[in-house]
Amino acid sequence: MSETNAGAGRGNGVEERTVGRISAALTACLRDWLAKGLQPGLHLVATPIGNLGDISPRALAAIATADRVYCEDTRTSRQLFTRFGIDRPLKAYHEHSTEAVRDEIVEAVIRGEAVALVSEAGMPAISDPGFKLARAVIAADGEVFVIPGPTAVTAALTVSGLPTDSFFFAGFLPQKGPGRRARIDALSSIPATLVIYESPHRLRPALQDLADGLGDRDAAVVREKTKKFEEVRRGTLTELAAWSRDVAPRGEIAIVIGPAPAPSSGEVDDAAIMAALHEALATERPSRAAKQVAESLGVPRGHVYQLAVRLKGEAG
């Protein structure tokens, strides 16, 4: 298992004239976007996931020139805006906002206003209530625009060292119960790298449940990306589950899991699994039968459970 901890960066003696050129270029970009203003519509504006330096001139201009600005957390957004000298009235739009608030925003867009929406961090509408608002605006024939930028999904995927040509973002797992098991079982059949968000206090059981359901795949735990104490732990799911028992991680966490390895000639095929399931299903429910067969054959439980459900359906 490997670890990466960014720590403090090193200065590289950038010349003052280079700083001046970069500053002038950024100022020119910002003036250009401030002069253009925003078209009427809903503008989904990405904000930093940690490092404030990741804000773009276009995002700052959108926030400064929008007719209205809605935020998932007005306190967090106000700190960001104050850092860049932007003083705007802010309104809240979040998971618990009422339909009346959503209707208010949609009506403003239809009247021809430019409305900016920012999440607490990252890209609005990605694992975020902004998607409901975007859908409502589209349903009312309004325009939706995006000002792209940081998002924890791609940041975690990029540093994980796992395949990036095909990936699936699964958001947060159900916290417990049959829904959690069913979700992991469904993920087991997706032929792509998986990205999952998790809270610090649920990291340990999540890693163990994922190891049980997906098999011992390569994975990475990515924590506090772009912040001072950012950290990446790489290893198999089993190794990471063992590591998590001795730590108390804090902050925002993403779990990145590599795709299942291609089966080799020596591995158990579906025919052998289904033969074992036929016998187990004679006396056990699909979930229990899948657990027994997976343990006896040393194969991922998620895939076995899917075969068990199929066999049960065919028999019933």
Image (tube, grey):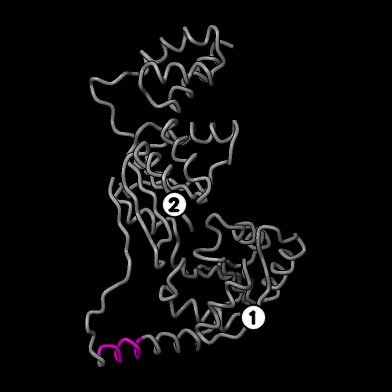
Element type at mark 2: strand
Residue 208 vertical placement versus 297 (above, below):
below
For the record, the magenta segment spans 18-25
Q: Residues within 10 Å of mark 1 (few under 14, many from 20)?
A: some
**Residue 212 image-quadrant placement:** top left
Image point 38% across, 31% down: which residue?
Answer: 215
Q: In front: 115, or 13?
A: 13
Viewer-side label of 2, 1: 2
**Residue 271 image-quadrant placement:** top left
Secondary structure mostly seen in magenta is helix
Q: In front: 212, or 260?
A: 212
For disc 1, the marked residue is: 67
Task: Give yes or no for contact between labels 2 and 1 (Cβ–Cβ under 8 Å).
Answer: no
Element type at mark 1: loop
Residue 5 vertical placement versus 113 (above, below):
above
Image coordinates of residue 119 in percent, x first then y, are 57, 66
Image coordinates of residue 152 in percent, x first then y, are 44, 59
Residue 34 vertical placement versus 287 (above, below):
below
Reply yes or no: does residue 43 show up in magenta: no
For disc 2, the marked residue is: 254
Image point 43% across, 60% down: which residue?
Answer: 224
Residue, far front: 246
295 sits to left or right of 140 = left
Q: Residues within 10 Å of mark 2 (few under 14, many from 20)?
A: many
Amino acid type, mark 2 = Ala
Image coordinates of residue 134 in percent, x first then y, are 61, 61
